[in-house]
Amino acid sequence: MRQERSRPLIVELEAWLREQRAKLSRNNDTTKAINYCLSRWDAFSRFIDDGRLCMSTDGVEKLSRQFMTTFFGFSFQAATIRS
């Protein structure tokens, strides 16, 4: 599924980024962002070939929300106890 649908989009995106970068000056902030993305292109596109990698960050966001809720809950309790 990823090979069929995502690979053509990723190839097209890379070509478009390179085309846009050629139109901009080197000191442009957008050029810097494009260079950042292109310099990490292998890591960015790794999800196509590795089915273990999730294409969304939902799981990570859920875990971080749970951690922060727990952390701040404990912090609040500790502050209440100290008072």
Image (cartoon, grey):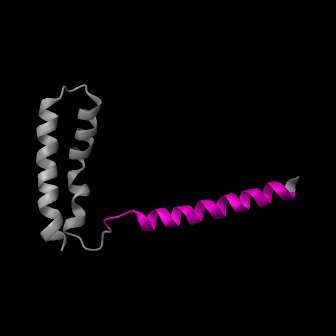
Residue 19 position within the rendered picture, expressed as x and y whole percent measured from the top left: 11, 39
Residue 74 position within the rendered picture, expressed as x and y whole percent measured from the top left: 72, 62
Is residue 6 on the magenta stretch? no
Q: Which residue is drawn at 25% across and 56% down?
A: 44
Q: In which quarter of the image is residue 26?
A: top left
Q: Residue at x 26, y 34 (%)?
A: 30
| Range drawn in magenta | 55-81
Residue 80 position within the rendered picture, expressed as x and y whole percent measured from the top left: 83, 56
Q: Quadrant of the N terminus?
A: bottom left
Residue 73 position within the rendered picture, expressed as x and y whole percent measured from the top left: 71, 61
- 33 with respect to 11 (left or right): right
Q: Residue at x 63, y 62 (%)?
A: 69
Q: Residue at x 14, y 70 (%)?
A: 3
When the figure is inspected, residue 73 is found, relative to residue 26, above or below; the finding is: below
Q: In which quarter of the image is residue 39?
A: top left
Which secondary structure type mostly characterizes the magenta part of the structure? helix
Q: In which quarter of the image is residue 48?
A: bottom left
- 74 with respect to 12 (left or right): right
When the figure is inspected, residue 54 is found, relative to residue 80, above or below; the finding is: below
Count of number-bearing discs:
0
Residue with the most extreme right position: 83
- 58 with respect to 69 (left or right): left
Is residue 68 on the magenta stretch? yes
